[in-house]
Image (cartoon, rainbow, N blue to C red):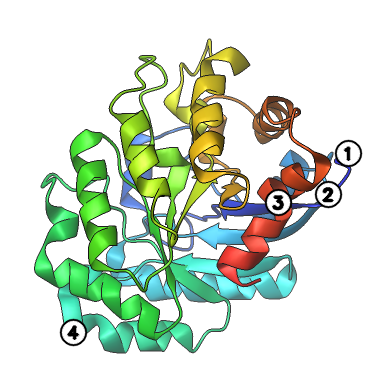
């Protein structure tokens, strides 16, 4: 049991019997319901006090239903204290009515419109997308950045430059190529991102980017250390990425690994990563 409670800032839940998730068709291991009871079993040895749900690439026509479904789940388990919803930000100013509708739900804390899966590396710097992201600050919402590869990350930096009033959080520390043991230009990009005071970093998904069958803590350490060196301990937070994390191991293993990798920090610094920073960023 942890000496302090934990906030999981990157929880996925889905039920393919309720909503449609097209990407699950090509992922047999994950193409099953993953629900609150399953998560409780996965974390039974930890004191998970709060959770932030992050959108799961539901069929775009059903994104409002996904947010409503999670809102109903939060009534069952009020530890769900935040929702990061999907929204069609590429619509630019025309998306404002949809953002306004989302914020009528007080659980909605931010938006994630995944950039990673876009074939056009310039997707996130298109004028309408930038305007859609800029609108988030008007409604007090943050933006979760999910990118992969140098070109997308470089353009995410340009997006951030254009949106100084929006709070951003980088999911999965920018998805570096851990399996290939590549650190550059990821290290430079992380350094550049950390220079923006409105950018935070989510320590999540690392083992998914590593060798699923043979990763070690030593494989992850250079990446963890660089994030902590650049962002410090006041703008970094833990995320479980369950159940996607199951590709590389149980959630318990990832939590224990991150605790071990940050063991040299003071108890107050560890608590920031596993608890305090999530409260601040997601306004829990």
Q: Earlier in the sequence, mark 1 or mark 3?
A: 1
Q: Dot 1: what SS?
A: loop
Q: Dot 4: what SS?
A: helix
Asked if marks 2 and 4 touch (Cβ < 8 Å), the reply is no
Is 34 located above or below residue 204 in the figure? below
In the displayed orientation, state which residue is furthest to the top: 214
Is 50 located above or below residue 221 in the figure? below
Name the residue tied to disc 2: 47
Q: Earlier in the sequence, mark 4 or mark 3?
A: 4
Asked if marks 2 and 1 touch (Cβ < 8 Å), the reply is yes
Q: Nearer the viewer, residue 253 or 60?
A: 253
User: Quick one: label 4, few (<14), some, or many (20+) residues within 10 Å?
Assistant: some
Q: Nearer the viewer, residue 185 or 25?
A: 185
Asked if marks 1 and 3 touch (Cβ < 8 Å), the reply is no
Name the residue tied to disc 4: 94
User: Quick one: label 2, few (<14), some, or many (20+) residues within 10 Å?
Assistant: some
Name the residue tied to disc 1: 1
Where is residue 270 drawn, in percent x and y?
Answer: 74, 42
Q: Earlier in the sequence, mark 2 or mark 3?
A: 2
User: Quick one: label 3, few (<14), some, or many (20+) residues within 10 Å?
Assistant: many
Residue at 36% x, 55% y: name it: 57
Q: Dot 2: what SS?
A: loop
- Give the spatial CA distance, label 1 vs label 3: 17 Å
Q: Nearer the viewer, mark 4 or mark 3?
A: 3
């Amino acid at each position: 049991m942890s000496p302090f409670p934990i906030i999981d800032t990157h929880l996925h839940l889905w039920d393919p019997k309720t909503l449609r998730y097209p990407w699950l068709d090509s992922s047999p291991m994950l193409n099953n319901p993953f629900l609150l009871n399953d998560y409780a079993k996965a974390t039974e040895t930890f004191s998970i006090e709060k959770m932030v749900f992050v959108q799961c690439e539901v069929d775009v026509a059903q994104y409002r239903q996904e947010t409503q479904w999670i809102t109903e789940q939060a009534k069952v388990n009020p530890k769900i204290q935040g929702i990061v919803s999907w929204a069609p930000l590429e619509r630019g100013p025309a998306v404002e009515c949809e953002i306004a509708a989302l914020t009528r739900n007080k659980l909605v804390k931010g938006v994630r419109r995944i950039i990673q899966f876009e074939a056009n590396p310039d997707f996130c710097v298109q004028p309408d997308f930038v305007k859609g992201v800029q609108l988030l600050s008007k409604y007090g919402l943050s933006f979760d950045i999910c990118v992969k590869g140098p070109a997308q990350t470089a353009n995410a930096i340009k997006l951030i430059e254009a949106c100084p009033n929006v709070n951003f959080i980088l999911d999965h520390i920018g998805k570096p190529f851990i399996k290939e043991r590549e650190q550059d230009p990821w290290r430079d990009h992380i350094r550049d991102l950390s220079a923006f005071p409105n950018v935070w970093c989510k320590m999540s998904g690392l083992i998914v980017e590593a060798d699923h069958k043979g990763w070690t803590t030593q494989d992850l350490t250079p990446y963890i250390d660089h994030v902590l060196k650049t962002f410090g301990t006041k703008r970094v937070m833990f995320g479980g990425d369950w159940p996607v994390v199951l590709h590389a191991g149980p959630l318990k293993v990832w939590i224990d690994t991150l605790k071990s990798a940050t063991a040299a920090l003071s108890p107050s610094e560890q608590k920031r990563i596993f608890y305090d920073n999530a409260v601040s960023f997601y306004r829990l």
